[in-house]
Amino acid sequence: MNTRAWLILLLLAVGIATGFYFLTREDKKTTHNWSRTLHTKNKEPYDISLFLAALRKSLGSDFHTIQNNSGLKNAWHSLQDGETKGTYFFIGDELYLTDEEMDLLVMHVKSGGTAFISASSIPQELFEKFPGLETRYLTTIYSDSIELKFSHATLKKDTFLFENKVKDKTQNTYWQYIGDRMESENQGQIFNGDDKTLVHISTIQNVFTDFVYLKFGQGRFYIHSNPVFLANYYLKRQEGRKYASYFLKHIPSQPLWLDMSASFPKPDAKKGYTEKSVFDFLDQNKPLKYAWWILVASVLLFLFTGGRRKQRSIPIIQTPSNNSLTLVESLGYFYFTQNKNALVFKREWNQFLNFIRFHLRINTDMVNEDTMQRISHKSGVALNTIQDIFHMYEKYKIFSELSGNEMIQINKTISKFYLEYYNKNGK
């Protein structure tokens, strides 16, 4: 590489090193991850470790966990143990459940248990398994802040404001609510007004229901669509703690099983629709985020330094010109100077027979009067012209040498056939 290339390489390397330093340096003002991670143990602004600590403290020995290497199937007997059924509880970003686990959840609620799910994404199959929820689904609105009110008489006096903060700025983001495919405009207090099995608990923006419970069998099924309201960032504020206290009032005072395993993908598990992009996922995982920017910098580095051609350019090969006429002239000059008229006659005769076989489909191995009449009929050439050609051949085929005048006469006789044929049939 020349000096200029080395200079560009050096500048890019310094730029990459500087960028990597600012991405990874330990700066108290920039170490927080402001994405909606909703992790249960971490202490980022939008994790939920503070809420789970408060929940664990309030329940004491009645608080249990379903670990990552287990699942609802293994905790089934513990949930069903005793006269008072336990509470299945999940809180997190995305819920992953298999068909078998969803069936167990339905059986648990029907037999008198409680299921409490707070997630940004819930499998549609789970809604469809509960009568009264078949047409419900989670959908979103896009805003930088949300107002929320509870519907209960003792709680409805308070209005809660949740802003999506990223460092010191308020940014637009997605907020979830429970929609209805059949009644998209019906957001009343009771979804199923006749039997009153599906009741809303709170609404956002005074219109959209984000927290409901379903009376099913002997139990209840709670759905909360914005677990981010219970994030560390909001619980550090008095308004957020007040909301969390109202939220906890709806959790039954009975043994609770927190499902940690349903936060992670597993074979055959169903998941709901999410508005997150690939870049949101990268932003939530620092190692992937660093790897992405290193990849981008490496590609730019290659384009500046190694992307240009290093081998000689491939020369353009000109298309060969048609030199058929030149070839004919060369061959004619060769035969003329060598005085090979008899050889020219044999080759012209072979070409004539090949024309008869190829165009007229007539065998020329044995030529007689019947053959000549067939040639005349199929070609449209006069019979006497064809007879003259074959008589001429019988006359000169035994000659080892031919004069120029004889060669001219032979050529005129054969050319007469081609002229009549093309006049009759066209080219």
Image: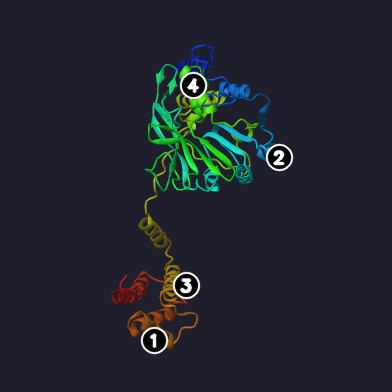
* Label 4: which secondary element: helix
Q: Amino acid at mark 4?
A: Lys
Please tell me whether mark 4 or mark 2 is closer to you in this view. 4
User: Counting other residues with Cα less than 10 Å from the Cα at mark 1, is it few (<14), some (14-19), or many (20 or more)?
Assistant: some
Pointer 4 or 2: first along the chain: 2
Pointer 2 or 3: first along the chain: 2
What mark, if any, has residue 211 been given in the picture?
none
Q: Which residue is mark 1?
A: 373
Tell me the quarter of the picture where residue 62 sits: top right
Q: Which residue is mark 4?
A: 242
Q: Is residue 202 above or below residue 44?
A: below
Q: Amino acid at mark 3?
A: Ser
Q: CA distance from mark 2 to mark 1?
A: 103 Å
Please tell me whether mark 3 or mark 1 is closer to you in this view. 1
Please tell me whether mark 2 or mark 1 is closer to you in this view. 2
Please tell me whether mark 4 or mark 3 is closer to you in this view. 4
Q: Amino acid at mark 1?
A: Gln
Residue extending furthest toward the bottom: 370
Q: Which residue is mark 2?
A: 77
